[in-house]
Image (cartoon, grey):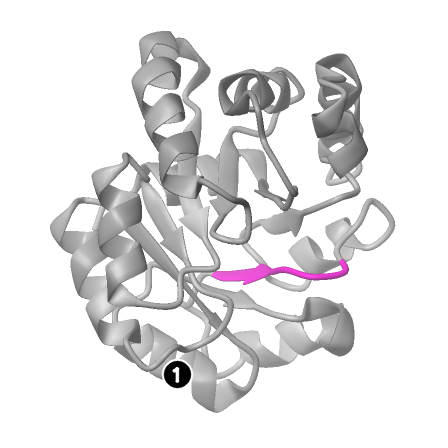
């Protein structure tokens, strides 16, 4: 399927996953990240009130379509969570691994026109995720495998869109891209929970811009 998420990832080479104990202003956070050059934002079910946050973003970020911000839900573990996130406006879904309801999650996402990124680690899991119809496969934890692992996966799976997550930072992000990843996942190196708590949006923009610069 044509996917704004995949198009954005291929252009920006980065996705930000936000893990915070609370998120008072998700709209400001998304605009701060977009100002730094990262327009794909994953809000996770580990943050309280995720569906309310997605609804806020869906209702307000869409009014600034020039930013081309794409916001989705992460840590999706069930079809029920997938449906709730999609109903709240998520434009993509991300799982940390291959949950028992992975096929249903893919079906729900695609029925709503949303991209689905399934998590995997082993070659068998990558094969399974791809067979289930994932638009991309997240390799987690990428830190444990390193960039060379992506080069190895490209051999049998040259057409699979791979995204490393976990332990990716400014020092190694470009290596993952050179090894065949279509984009990399940034975490606390860009969005520190303390910066979110204190609404330090300019700092988050600076972090995002620095991370993007490291990908070149």
What segment is highlighted magenta in the picture? 162-167
Question: Can you say whether 176 is above or below 36 in the image?
Answer: below
Q: In this view, which residue lies farthest toward the right? A: 171
Quarter of the image with the C terminus in it = top right
Residue placed most toward the observer, 31 or 199? 199
Residue 58, quarter of picture: top left
Residue 74's place in the image compared with 130, above or below, is: above
Tell whether 125 sits left or right of 204: left
Mark 1, Cα crowd under 10 Å, few <14 / some 14-19 / many 20+, is some
Q: Position of residue 93 (x, y in %)?
A: 36, 52
Residue 48 x %, y %: 51, 44
Give the quarter of the image for residue 160.
Answer: bottom left
Q: Secondary structure at mark 1?
A: helix
* Magenta-drawn stretch contains 166: yes
Query: Label 1 belongs to which residue?
Result: 127
Most foreground residue, 18 or 144: 18
Q: Residue at position x 74%, y 37% from top?
A: 193
């Amino acid at each position: 399927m044509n996917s704004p998420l995949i198009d954005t990832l291929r252009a920006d080479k980065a996705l930000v996953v936000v893990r915070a104990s609370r998120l008072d202003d998700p709209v400001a956070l998304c605009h701060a990240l977009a100002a730094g050059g990262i327009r794909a934002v994953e809000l996770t079910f580990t943050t309280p009130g995720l569906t309310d946050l997605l609804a806020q973003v869906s209702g307000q970020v869409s009014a600034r379509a020039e930013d081309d911000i794409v916001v989705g839900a992460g840590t999706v573990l069930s079809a029920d969570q997938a449906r709730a996130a999609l109903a709240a406006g998520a434009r993509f879904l991300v799982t940390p691994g291959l949950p028992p309801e992975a096929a249903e999650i893919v079906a729900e996402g695609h029925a709503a026109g949303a991209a689905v990124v399934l998590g995997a680690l082993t070659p068998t899991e990558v094969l399974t995720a791809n067979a289930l119809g994932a638009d991309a496969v997240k390799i987690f934890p990428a830190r444990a495998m390193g960039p060379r692992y992506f080069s190895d996966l490209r051999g049998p799976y040259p057409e699979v869109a791979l995204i490393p997550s976990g332990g990716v930072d400014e020092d190694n992000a470009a290596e993952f891209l050179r090894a065949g990843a279509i984009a990399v996942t940034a975490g606390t190196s860009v969005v520190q929970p303390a910066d979110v708590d204190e609404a330090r949006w300019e700092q988050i923009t600076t972090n995002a811009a620095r991370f993007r610069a490291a990908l070149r």
